[in-house]
Image: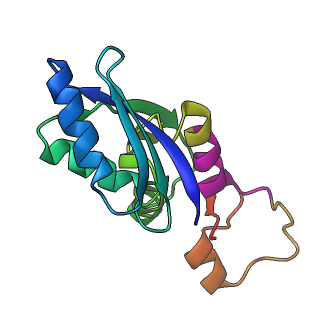
Amino acid sequence: MAKQDISLPIQGMTCAACANRIEKGLQRMDGVEDAHVNFAVEKANVTYDSEQVDAKAFEDKIEKLGYHVQLESITFDISGMTCAACASRIEKKLSRTDGVNKARVNFALENVTVDYNEGVVNKQGSLNLLRRLVIPCTNNNRKKKPSMRKRKKFATKPGSLSLQQY
């Protein structure tokens, strides 16, 4: 059992009954060990088994009950993308990350905007994640060029971006 805690900021509650409705809805979910909703601070705190349920399921449940999970948004400048495929890879990797609701890469402006749940991913965590996914290539050894296949797949030309696989 991989026990985790999450704090979700909730919008749209107008009374204590709203908080009670959300709390009961979350407690009925598989994998949830404990759930508490505080109307005064507009937050839900959930203890759950991450092997049975993920953070996105809580957001979906709260939305289904008629309330909204407040998302934070941050924009990072990135440079060195050589094609739309680079932008697409970055966007897909970020969007699959737990706690990230949506990622939008703008190839022309060379930036990425990430909508995320602050209870799961904080701003520093988003920045660290982006650094792991998109790092400037530091291999400037001109004597040993990467093969064409590798250059195409991983974009390893000097000054370009490199996507780190896990």
**Scheme of image coloration:** rainbow
Q: Does residue 151 appear to the left or right of 50 in the view shown?
A: right
Residue drawn where x is 22% and y is 47% of the image: 25
- Across and down, in percent, residue 63 comes to 18, 43
**Can the viewer see residue 160?**
no
- Across and down, in percent, residue 125 comes to 60, 40
Q: Which residues are magenta?
A: 127-138
Count of numbered labels shown in the rendering: 0
133 in the magenta segment: yes
**Can the viewer see residue 125?**
yes
Q: Does residue 75 appear to the left or right of 146 in the view shown?
A: left
Closer to the camera in the image, 150 or 62: 62
Residue drawn where x is 60% and y is 68% of the image: 155
Residue 45 placement: quadrant: top left
40 above or below 71? above
Residue drawn where x is 44% and y is 31% of the image: 74
- Across and down, in percent, residue 13 comes to 18, 23
Query: Which image quarter is the C terminus in?
Result: bottom right
Q: Does residue 92 appear to the left or right of 152 in the view shown?
A: left
134 in the magenta segment: yes
Can you name the residue that lies furthest to the top here? 40
Residue drawn where x is 11% and y is 38% of the image: 66
